Image (spheres, grey):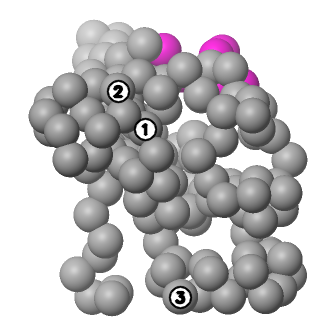
């Protein structure tokens, strides 16, 4: 029985992928998806009073990170490395000055807490890659 419990604990740790980490550590603040038009209206016309988001959405972060970090039209693997390193750095040392979000978005939120003691290096890699690889849900356009 003891071996079974240890195996389950290790399996859970090994199988933790970016989306699972998001669900367990990030989803309470960062919603997965809100259409871009709704986000623009919420922040530009309503100062986040319409949606009352706690933090930028994953689709918002994915779009802005890929647009603002490195050379988006350059080498894909190099761009991925730049963006994921930025995400990992930001998660450990969040700072509004480093944010890639629009000013109207940045001003709607407090600076997030550091995830330094919340995520290990493997989890940082997994969540950073998951955010980079995020794909808009097919049924939501």
Any part of residue 114 in sight: yes
At horizontal 54% and vertical 20% (from top left) the residue drawn is: 89
- Residue hosting label 1: 69
Q: Nearer the viewer, mark 3 or mark 1?
A: 1
Q: Residue 115, relative to residue 141: is it above or below?
A: above
At horizontal 66% and vertical 15% (from top left) the residue drawn is: 117
User: Quick one: 50 or 9, which is closer to the camera?
Assistant: 50
Q: Is residue 28 magenta?
A: no
Q: Earlier in the sequence, mark 2 or mark 1?
A: 1
At horizontal 20% and vertical 47% (from top left) the residue drawn is: 73
- Residue hosting label 2: 82
Residue 17 vs residue 100: left or right? Answer: left
x and y percentages locating residue 1 in the rendered image: 31, 17
Give the Cα distance between marks 3 and 1: 23 Å
Q: Residues within 10 Å of mark 3 (few under 14, many from 20)?
A: few
Any part of residue 54 in sight: no
Badge 2 vs badge 1, beta-carbon distance below 8 Å: yes
x and y percentages locating residue 140 in the rendered image: 34, 87
Residue 46 vs residue 129: left or right? Answer: right
User: Quick one: 69 or 47, which is closer to the camera?
Assistant: 69
Badge 3 vs badge 1, beta-carbon distance below 8 Å: no
- Residue hosting label 3: 37
Residue 1 vs residue 40: left or right? Answer: left
Q: Main secondary structure of the magenta part?
A: loop
Q: Residue 95, relative to residue 64: is it above or below?
A: above
User: Quick one: 59 or 69, which is closer to the camera?
Assistant: 69
The segment highlighted magenta reads 114-120
Q: Which mark is residue 103?
A: none
Q: Residue 44, relative to residue 101: is it above or below?
A: below
Secondary structure under tag 2 reads helix
């Amino acid at each position: 029985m003891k071996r079974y419990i240890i195996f389950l604990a290790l399996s859970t740790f090994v199988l933790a992928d970016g989306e699972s980490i998001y669900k367990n550590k990030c989803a309470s603040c960062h919603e997965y998806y809100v259409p871009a038009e709704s986000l623009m209206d919420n922040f530009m016309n309503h100062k986040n009073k319409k949606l009352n988001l706690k933090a930028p959405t994953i689709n918002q972060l994915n779009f802005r990170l890929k647009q603002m970090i490195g050379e988006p039209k350059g080498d894909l693997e190099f761009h991925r490395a730049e963006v994921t390193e930025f995400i990992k750095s930001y998660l450990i040392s969040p700072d509004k000055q480093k944010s890639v979000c629009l000013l109207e978005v940045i001003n709607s939120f407090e600076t997030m807490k550091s995830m330094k003691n919340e995520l290990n290096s493997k989890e940082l890699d997994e969540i950073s890659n998951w955010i980079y690889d995020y794909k808009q849900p097919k049924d939501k356009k």
